Amino acid sequence: MTADTASVREGEALDWPTLEAWLKTNIDVVEGEMRVRQFHGGHANLTYCLSFDNLELVVRRQPFGDIAPGAHDMKREFRALSGIHPVFDRAPKTYAYCEDESVIGAPFIVMERRPGVIVRTEIPDEFKTIENIESRVSFALVDAMAEFHALDPVKIGLGDLGKPDGFVSRQLKGWYGRWQRVVDGTSPEFESAHERLLANQPETQRYTLVHNDLKLDNCMFEVNNPDRVSTILDWDMTTLGDPLIELGTLLSYWGQANDVTDRSPTIALDMTNFPSRASLVARYAKQGAEVNQIGWYEAFGLWKQAVVLQQLYKRFENGETQDARFKDFPKHIPGMLRSVNQLLS
């Protein structure tokens, strides 16, 4: 058993015999009896570690309950990884994609299981004695992001993965719609933030592949090398778009000492000794990117994160998950929305 997995959470078991039979029929290398553990670190897609005699596999499917249109797209994740993995070794290898919902109740993908170190709630034991560890993992993440954004989507067969023109406008519209699906009544703070984002929307300077959730706890580092991200996780929202959306999302999660609100309630990491948000922007800009309007993208990231927190809480309120972490998420939303308005004032 491994430290990053645990027993399957109550209410999140699948049809294991049917899944085992499907895997043994569709993946030639599977041998022996299947043993199941669950990855508990994430908050959305259900992710399981399946151990056999000769290898370990990772199976991912969408969460239970109401799913926003276009969200948790396993087919998109499979296609993206199939194109990216051969040219970008931080992306895991995929084995199969299954559309047949009779197997485990939803489409799912099967990928390789990779070892590595994740920085989520604290600096892990493997890294605690390493000098300047906070800066090293932070800048390694930004470097991995910049390298990913430098990929040519056309050359790897992903030139039609999304519609880059109008990407930012669609993001605003899409996340506004998601908010409306999971709230009762109105929120003046949310509406004000949305109006400011619309009024100050920047013009996109370039289009690249965008992971759409590239943050510290979606990365794995080599066990003995915190200066390199070995694996990036959770590719189901990958598309073509404005790469500063990616950087802005990272900044929206990144806490620092003078913050008046908790920017990362889904991570719960003490970031006292981590580099500042300005340092991350400067590191990314070294790759030649234009970052003059990064404040808007950071504000958008905070606004989007408010929607995500409300979505997660709604799943808990509806009884679609027993994950107790979700119940306190709404209390962080007002502070995030105030920060949006401050960044855009």
Image: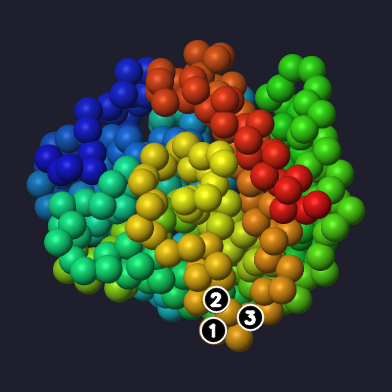
Whether residue 51 is situated above or below residue 277 in the rendered picture = above
**Of residues 76 and 172, the one drawn nearer to the viewer in this rendering:** 172
Q: Given the image, on which type of amino acid does mark 1 rest?
A: Lys
Which residue corresponds to the image point at 27% horizontal and 27% vertical from the top-left?
A: 8
Residue 30 image position (x, y, % from top left): 20, 49
**Which residue has dot 2 on it?**
282
Judge from the rendering whether residue 217 lies leftward or rightward of residue 345; answer left or right.
Answer: left
Q: Are marks 1 and 3 in contact (CB under 8 Å)?
A: no
Q: Is residue 232 visible?
A: yes
Please state which of the two labelled residues, at mark 2 or mark 3, is closer to the viewer: 2
Which residue corresponds to the image point at 41% horizontal and 35% vertical from the top-left?
A: 46
**Which residue has dot 1 on it?**
286
* Distance from the alpha carbon under mark 1 to that under mark 2: 6 Å
Residue 223 position by quadrant? bottom left
**Of residues 155 and 179, the one drawn nearer to the viewer in this rendering:** 179
Res 289 label? 3
Residue 52 image position (x, y, % from top left): 15, 44
Residue 173 image position (x, y, % from top left): 80, 45
Q: State the scheme by which the image is colored.
A: rainbow
